[in-house]
Image (cartoon, rainbow, N blue to C red):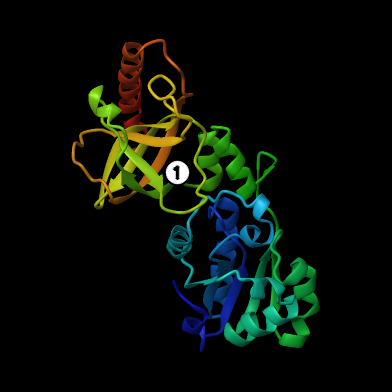
Amino acid sequence: MHCLADVEGFKTVITIGNFDGVHTGHQSLVKKVIERAQVNNCKSVVITFNMHPYHLLYPEMKPYLLTSSSNKERRLIDLGIDYVCPLEFTPELSEMSANDFLKDIIIDHLNAVEVVIGYDARFGKDREGDYSFLKKMEETYNYKTIFVDSQKNDDDVVSSSLMRALLRDGNLGRATELMGYHYGYQGTVVRGKQIGHRINFPTLNIVPLAEHQLIPATGIYLSRVKIEGILYWGATNIGYSPTIKTEQKLEVEMFVFDFDRDIYGQNIEIEFIQRLRSEEKFASIDELIEQIGEDVKYAKSLIPLYKN
């Protein structure tokens, strides 16, 4: 990841925030940063954090996250940002005043000539650093503040908390629309109980790499996965497999079409494309097998809709 030292020597236009999910609201803010950087012949910079501040400040309220630090940086760079500066959110940083943060990091380290601030962005102790604070300090540090209001879609304010709620409720279609891409994450393939092999639907059991990764609502999903750079389609069950398992353990198990290799221990990236149905408990394993066959058939029929 880029650090503050990488940016020293350049004049910059910066923004600051968690950017969890890098959804369409974030993308609008990033677009403004890039636009202003081009006007000012500067580098564009996003200041973010390597963990959500709530994980330190309010551990009982810590949210499950939409993007790992590495995925967040990748998405921001793909949007055209020159530098991503992920700060380690430590107790010391949480106690830094907004003025010290502005002077030491934004001005002295990053040479900011403009600060683009979103409607809900805050920094510094007690969240003092907001738009009004930045406007008040403009003459002191010789920069300009640009405010970007919330983005709305059908009266919904686009936010990370809304994305989390939609995914938890199984409203994948709406979440995809507001995120601007298909939700997914990186995970490790671990060995399960091999039940899928015994019923002729072998699955990859995928455990998220990132701690506190948000898992969508239980159910069956059309999904795709990148394995060693190659994209495969499949059907994924998120849930507890109540027909064949008794322990209450949430698992993500993907039946990958046209794939029959053992890749235990490998890291892969899964995307959830469309939710097909909710998870059910069947009267028998034969009923379950029949339904899985229907799910696979339905999932395969949908692939042409998403190939382009």
At x 31%, y 12%, the residue is 286
Residue 288 vertical position relative to residue 54 in the rendered view, above or below: above
Near mark 1 (Cα within 10 A), the count class, few <14, some 14-19 or many ≥20, is some
- Residue at the farthest bottom position: 9
Residue behind mark 1 = 182
Look at label 1 and name its amino acid: His
At x 60%, y 61%, the residue is 18
**Percent position of residue 237, x then y:** 40, 30
Image-based side of 294 in relation to 242, left or right: left
The quarter in which the N terminus is drawn is: bottom left
Residue 275 vertical position relative to residue 96 in the rendered view, above or below: above
**Percent position of residue 270, x then y:** 37, 44
The quarter in which the C terminus is drawn is: top left
Image-based side of 229 in relation to 142, left or right: left
Q: Is residue 158 in view? A: no
**Percent position of residue 74, x then y:** 43, 62
Give the total of numbered labels.
1
Quarter residue 240 falls in = top left
Q: Is residue 61 in view? A: yes
Image-based side of 301 in relation to 124, left or right: left
- Residue at the farthest left position: 261
Is label 1 in a helix, a strand or a loop? loop
Image-based side of 226 in relation to 61, left or right: left
At x 70%, y 40%, the residue is 155
